[in-house]
């Protein structure tokens, strides 16, 4: 009986999820050979340890391909522990979808365990991360998490990947799609040809609204979402929120952005200021009010859209 108990204990240990104050997190299968650990929708903080994105793995014959490992060294260590519950195969390659540190600073943990791993990123991301942006994102993550990023070192991708480029890894083909600026001027989206899965990075949000900074374009984001819709993937993996089919992942966020554009264009044509447009438009966005970040981001999105329309 004691051996049966030991076996049960070992099985339980291997299957328990990564426990955080905000919930339990583990990889779930979303397509053939494709697994995603869906992070919380809140901003990086002490409670979520800075973890908020959707690390994903694609299994090949002899290894794993990892997309967006996470936000800090410690997050990366926990992501690795969860990966090992899915497969003991080595990580052969890592793809970073853009410059925002919540997606790629965990490169540190991955490269520590797999020193020869190839890490891919957009040329502009590599340039920015090699400069001041990498260190700036470590400071941001450390401040937001009250010191939980202090051990994180900047590990920059060394392998460039550009629009329409196909990378073959252990017999599996991965195609890059990069139309910038959109969420940033460093975006790549990754299509796994075999499973018909598209990893959107932060060009895709589900039940969450993120920021559009100076490197972004809301009009560009609408163009990108139209583009990836036409790929007719079986599964879309957003940067934040649940993975799923086009109508669950692409359509709602694209609808939000197109509504934003239409309201700002009308207000601009009527000579309204951006804050007046916000006050007039907000009731029409009732179905998005419960999305994480709506209160903080809606006014900023109006202002950003106003500036883009003004520039046209």
Image (cartoon, rainbow, N blue to C red):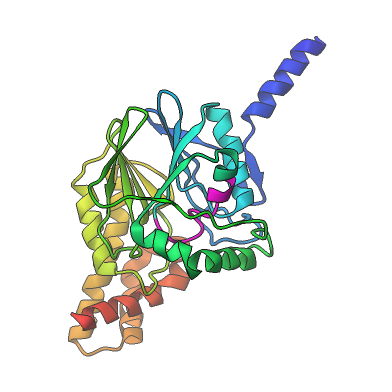
- Left or right relative to 21: residue 132: left
Residue 235 falls in image quadrant: top left
Closer to the camera in the image, 98 or 229: 98
Q: Which range is magenta?
A: 98-109
Q: Is residue 24 in view?
A: no
- At a point 65% along the width and 27% down the height, the residue shown is 14
- Which residue sits furthest right? 2
In which quarter of the view is residue 1 placed?
top right
Q: Quadrant of residue 274?
A: bottom left
Which percent across, then down, holds residue 256?
30, 63
Q: Nearer the viewer, residue 96 or 132?
A: 132
Tell which residue pokes out farthest to the top in this image: 1
- Residue 157 lies, with reference to residue 1, above or below; the image says below
Which residue is rendered at x = 32% and y = 50% of the image? 161
**x, y percent for residue 145:** 64, 62
Q: Is residue 212 visible?
A: yes
Closer to us: 95 or 4: 95
Q: Position of residue 144 (x, y in %)?
A: 61, 66
Q: Position of residue 186 (x, y in %)?
A: 35, 61
Magenta span has 100?
Answer: yes
- Front residue of this view, candidates 156 and 52: 156
């Amino acid at each position: 009986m004691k051996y049966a108990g030991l076996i049960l204990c070992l099985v339980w240990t291997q299957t328990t999820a990564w426990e955080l104050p905000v919930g339990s997190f583990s990889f779930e299968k979303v397509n053939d050979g494709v697994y995603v650990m869906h992070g919380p929708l809140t901003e990086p903080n002490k409670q979520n340890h800075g973890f908020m994105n959707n690390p994903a793995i694609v299994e090949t014959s002899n290894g794993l391909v990892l997309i967006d490992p996470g936000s800090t060294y410690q997050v990366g260590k926990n992501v690795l522990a969860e990966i090992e519950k899915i497969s003991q195969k080595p990580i052969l390659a890592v793809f970073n979808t853009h410059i925002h540190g919540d997606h790629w600073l965990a490169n540190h943990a991955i490269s520590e365990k797999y020193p020869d791993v190839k890490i891919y990123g957009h040329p502009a991301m590599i340039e920015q991360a090699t400069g001041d942006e990498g260190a700036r994102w470590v400071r941001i993550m450390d401040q937001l998490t009250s010191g939980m990023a202090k051990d994180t070192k900047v590990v920059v991708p060394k392998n460039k990947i550009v629009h329409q480029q196909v990378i073959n890894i252990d017999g599996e083909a991965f195609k890059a799609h990069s139309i910038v600026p959109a969420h940033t001027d460093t975006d790549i989206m990754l299509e796994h040809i075999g499973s018909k899965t598209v990893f959107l990075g932060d060009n895709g949000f589900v039940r969450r609204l993120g920021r559009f900074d100076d490197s972004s374009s809301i009009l560009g984001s609408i163009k990108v979402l139209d583009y990836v819709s036409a790929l007719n993937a079986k599964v879309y993996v957003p940067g934040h929120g649940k993975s799923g089919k086009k109508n669950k992942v692409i359509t709602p966020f694209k609808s939000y952005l197109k509504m934003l554009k239409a309201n700002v264009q009308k207000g601009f044509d009527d000579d309204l200021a951006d804050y007046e447009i916000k006050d007039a438009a907000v009731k029409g966005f009732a179905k998005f009010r419960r999305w994480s970040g709506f209160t903080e981001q809606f006014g900023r999105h109006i202002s950003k859209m106003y500036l883009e329309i003004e520039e046209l």
